[in-house]
Amino acid sequence: MKRLNTISLSFIVIYTMNMESTLSFYSALGMEFIEEQHGSSNLVHHAHACNLGSIVLEIYPYQATLLNPENKQKMGAESRFGFNVTSLEERLCNLEKLGIKSKLSSKVKNNEQRVSVTDPDGRVILLTEISSVD
């Protein structure tokens, strides 16, 4: 039998042209961010300062050199993320204050609810309500 490799996600980097609204969106989901700058780089970005397990989420300002200029899609539209959250109703209320509407998705096991929302750059974010986040 072939042995399976062990691999785990260590970080996610989101590039955005809308830093303020993107930070507001993810903050409304319950994430906190701190401003960072590495080494001699002039590029200031934001990293999460909350518990996402062992995953680091960073939000960087968009730089034209990073993306194909022929891409006609809204930046980020081809990406999709999922977060397990407690208090889904509270998260949706926070997003609604930002003018972001949710779309009820299918029910999942144990009657947990799934809702999809779209962040300011067009990424579909799937939120699943769970009783506790490990």
Image (tube, rainbow, N blue to C red):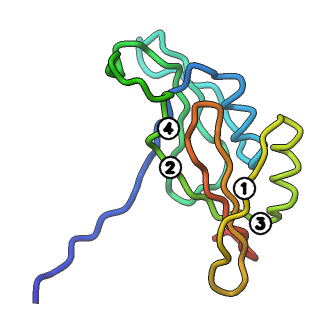
* Residue that carries the numbered disc 4 in the rendered image: 77
Q: CA distance from mark 2 to mark 1?
A: 15 Å
Binning the other alpha carbons within 10 Å of mark 4 as few (below 14), some (14 to 19) or many (20 upward) gives some
**Badge 2 is on which residue?**
80
Report the Cα–Cα distance between label 3 and label 2. 20 Å
Residue position for label 3: 86
Which one is nearer the viewer's eye here, 125 or 87? 125
**Residue type for callout 2:** Arg
**Image-quadrant location for residue 32:** top right
Identify the amino acid type marked 4: Ala
Q: Measured from the top left, where is residue 90 in percent x and y?
A: 87, 56
Furthest-left residue in this view = 1
Give yes or no for contact between labels 3 and 2 (Cβ–Cβ under 8 Å).
no
Query: 3 left or right of 45?
Result: left
Q: Residues within 10 Å of mark 1 (few under 14, many from 20)?
A: few
Residue 68 vertical placement versus 53 (above, below): above
- Locate residue 26: give its quadrant: top right
Q: Nearer the viewer, mark 2 or mark 4?
A: 4
Residue 117 in percent (x, y) is at 68, 49
Secondary structure of the residue carrying tag 3 is loop
